[in-house]
Image (cartoon, rainbow, N blue to C red):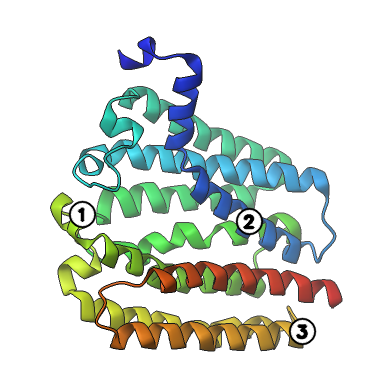
Amino acid sequence: MVEKTMSYTSVLREYLVLTKPGIVTLVLITTLGGLYIGSKGDLDPILVFWTLLGTGLAAAGSAVVNMVLDRDIDSLMERTSERPLPRGAVNPKNALLFGLCLIVLSFVILSWFVNLISALLAMLASFSYVVLYTLLLKRRTPVATEIGGISGALPPVIGYVAGAGELDLKALVLFLIMFMWQPPHFWVLALKYRNDYARAGIPTLPVVRGVLTTKVKTLLYTVSLLPLSVIPYAIGMTGKLYLITAIVLSLIYTGYTLAFIFSKRDYSMKLFFFSIIYLAVLFSMMVLDLVKA
């Protein structure tokens, strides 16, 4: 096998790529934000360690299994053809075992060192990403993007439950903000790579419904973030500094999206990157305003 002819360092590097470190990093950032809010700013370093480790392992394991299941279509897309599995650098069976072990280890760590609710939520995130999104929906319907948002919306909830010890309205608000943020963030990227997705037979929204419909749905989701982002202030999670920031950010995001709709360009990476800035600043201000509360 190819793996046997590679150095240990090269093999480790390939397996690390399978875990999608960039996505795992974003998962950990939102998890930490939720943990800080759930613990009301009183972070226990040991709890932080186990929560981030367990959640990170679940995200990494899910990413690996996703790559195993998608290796055939990844080989057809220019953007993903150089991943380890399409290149034959990693044995699919070994990769699948690796991914499943990470997910199981995540459940053990979270249930033992954090709490059972956090562990179950992490498993729900893995299930929604691997089974609902990758196995059942991704190759069949553009709705996969919205349903797949469940997995990405759960990390801050996992963190919140780790800190608060329970699910409540605040956890639901964090989930809804993340859930509504993800589709417009992804659709801009899907517009850029729509030819890639079409070549691989993946029915993303731009492939199935076209550019204009995708732009309009992007606007609808973006606009919905304004009232959602105000809820943390309305229920006493944050103060006025967060409220002002959330309103300004949401208005700017909506403005960028409107400009994108009326633009003749099929995609806008400026909008894509602003969506990342939007989420990062929103969660940062939520945490900062909690400090002052």
Q: What's the amino acid at mark 1?
A: Asp
Query: Which of pointers 3 and 2 lies earlier in the amino acid sequence?
Result: 2
- Residue contact at pointers 3 and 2, CB within 8 angstroms: no
Quadrant of the image containing the N terminus: top left
Where is 190 relative to 24, above or below? below
Determine whether the residue tagged by mark 3 lies in a helix, strand or loop. Answer: loop
Q: Nearer the viewer, residue 108 or 64?
A: 64
**Location of residue 236 in the rendering, given as x and y in whole percent from the top left corner:** 74, 83
Q: Residue at x 14, y 52 (%)?
A: 199
Q: What's the amino acid at mark 2?
A: Ile
Residue indicated by mark 3: 239
**Location of residue 189 in the rendering, given as x and y in whole percent from the top left corner:** 34, 63
Determine whether the residue tagged by mark 2 lies in a helix, strand or loop. Answer: helix
Query: Which of pointers 3 and 1 lies earlier in the amino acid sequence?
Result: 1
Q: How much space separates mark 2 and mark 1, taking CA atoms?
A: 30 Å
Residue lying at the far top in this picture: please name it.
Answer: 5
Where is 101 relative to 173, above or below? above
- In the image, taking residue 272 as reference, residue 198 lies left or right, namely left
**Location of residue 266 in the rendering, given as x and y in whole percent from the top left corner:** 25, 74
Where is 122 relative to 237, above or below? above
Q: What's the amino acid at mark 3?
A: Gly
Residue indicated by mark 2: 29
Determine whether the residue tagged by mark 1 lies in a helix, strand or loop. Answer: helix
Residue 71, labelled with which disc? Answer: none
Please say whether residue 254 is visible from this viewpoint: yes
- In the image, taking residue 148 as reference, residue 276 lies left or right, namely right
Residue 196, labelled with which disc? Answer: 1
